[in-house]
Structures are given as C-alpha cells and as structure tokens.
Amino acid sequence: MMIWTTIHLLILVTTALSGRFVADDEFADAKRLYYTIARDEMLHHAPNTAQAYLALPFREPLVMLERNPTWSKVRTRGGEQGYVPTASISNTWIRVSKQRKAVYVYRGTELVRKLPADFGANVVSDKIRRGNVSSPDDWRTPEGTFFVVSKNPNSKFYKAFVLNYPNAEDAERGYRDGLISKEQRDAIHRAEQRGDVPPMDTQLGGWIEIHGSGTGGGTNWTQGCIAIRNEQMDELWALVHEGTPVITEY
C-alpha cells in the first residue's frame, strides 16, 4: 500500500481541481495552491473592482503569488496573472482516513486540525451502491476525491458538509456495472461540471456528508457519512466552504 505524503495528497487535490494530471515539476505550485470559492468571481488587472478582465469558474485552481488581507495576486492554470478578493479564495482541504478513523484539515501543506471521526458499519470497503436496513453492509463511506457541494446549517445531525457523491468517476463505474442509466450518468457529469449537487436518488446512493453529533470515539454507526463532534463542526464551519476538496481513503 502506498504511503501518501501531504504533498502527494495536495497534488491529487490540484489534479482534481484542474481536471488534468499534475506532474512532479509542479510541486512548488501545488504548495501554493488556492481555489475560488465564489461562483461568479473575476480576475482583475489591479487590486480593485474597476479593471476586471477574466471570469474565474467556481473551484478554479490558482497559484498564490502575493497574499494580502483584501486583494491577492494570483496566477491561473492558463498563465494569466491578476488580483482577486482574498475572501473569494481558499487553500483549505480535507483528508478523511477510514483506517485511522480521523479527519485531517489542512491549509496548504499545514495541518490545522486532526479530529476523531465515526463511520458506517463497513469501514473497510469502498461504497458501490445504495444501502438500506436490509443491506447495512452497503452503508459505506466512498473513497476518492470529492468536494463540499453544499453546507447545511440545519442538519438532522447538527450541521453538515454535503459531499458531491456520486461524482463523475462513480457515475462511470455505475453505468459500466449497470447500476444507473446513461441519462443518470450524464446528469451526474453535468452536476460536477457546474459544481452542483448531483442526483442523490440513484442506485449509487448519495447524501454522504461530514456532519456533527459524532461520539469522538471512532465508532461505527452512520449510513456512510463521517461524523465528528458538534463543537468540532463549529470550529470548521467558517474554515470549510462550498468547493473545499475532500480526499477520502481507507
């Protein structure tokens, strides 16, 4: 089993955001990786709103060149340089380890939180299909690279970060295995491209979240979600945004 270092995981985040493979010679840029959390942001020639010249898509990867409290100078993956409001970008990302029953929260390469977490009944296996009371073994936490697609402040389990499961990779697998139709597969792809909540009612399952009301003891009781304590959700609420990358691994 490969031992993932923080920088290798950050490369996965970069690859997921950019939609292309990130090579070893881009390590330096990966360490300075940010991404847009605003859905209608612009790149500006100067640190003000008067000279906007390029639309930045939601979750657009950016390399930080100079960070300031109000405006930051960045470079896009296409090489364009300019300024964005600092409040419209983030470098936070989350790593979930099912084996260690823990949630790790990073800012760039800096680990800022390590939290104990609860999982579903089958913590070992990857998620394949929807679970139910007659098939609790399928209440699994999916493995892969996802992002926070919405935040729910009124969750049944205190508060929740909703992940974009099923994602495009899950959709391809589900279509290949006959679990979903071509129309369902295409709808999941479109949702990922737009940064929207994917269809949650297919045979792949859905509504996988990082939510509150966890025990803090690493127990197995959820239906595939990741549960942390309520006070820890409060700590993360302002740090985690729609668009925040989440890597889940065994």
Image (tube, helix red, strand yellow):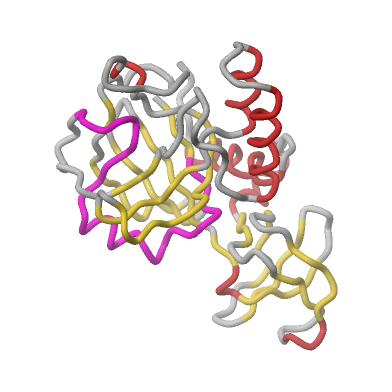
Q: Position of residue 228 (x, y in %)?
A: 25, 46
Q: Quadrant of residue 74?
A: bottom right
Coordinates of residue 221 in the picture (x, y in percent): 21, 30
Q: Residue at x 24, y 36 (%)?
A: 118
Q: Is residue 121 left or right of residue 140?
A: left
Seen in the picture, residue 56 relative to 188 is either above or below; the reply is: below
Q: Is residue 213 magenta?
A: no
On the image, which quarter does residue 137 sit in? Answer: top left
For the image, the number of numbered tags is 0
Q: Which residues are magenta?
A: 220-246
In the image, residue 109 sits, relative to residue 117, either above or below, namely below
Quadrant (top left, top right, bottom left, bottom right) of the C terminus = top left
**Position of 131 compared to 169: left or right?**
left
Q: Residue at x 82, y 83 (%)?
A: 51
Out of 250 and 22, give the one closest to the viewer: 250
Query: Percent x, y for residue 202?
Result: 52, 28
> In the image, what residue occupies the spot 47% across and 56% down?
107
Q: Is residue 189 above or below residue 67?
A: above
**Observer-nearest of 210 and 138:** 138
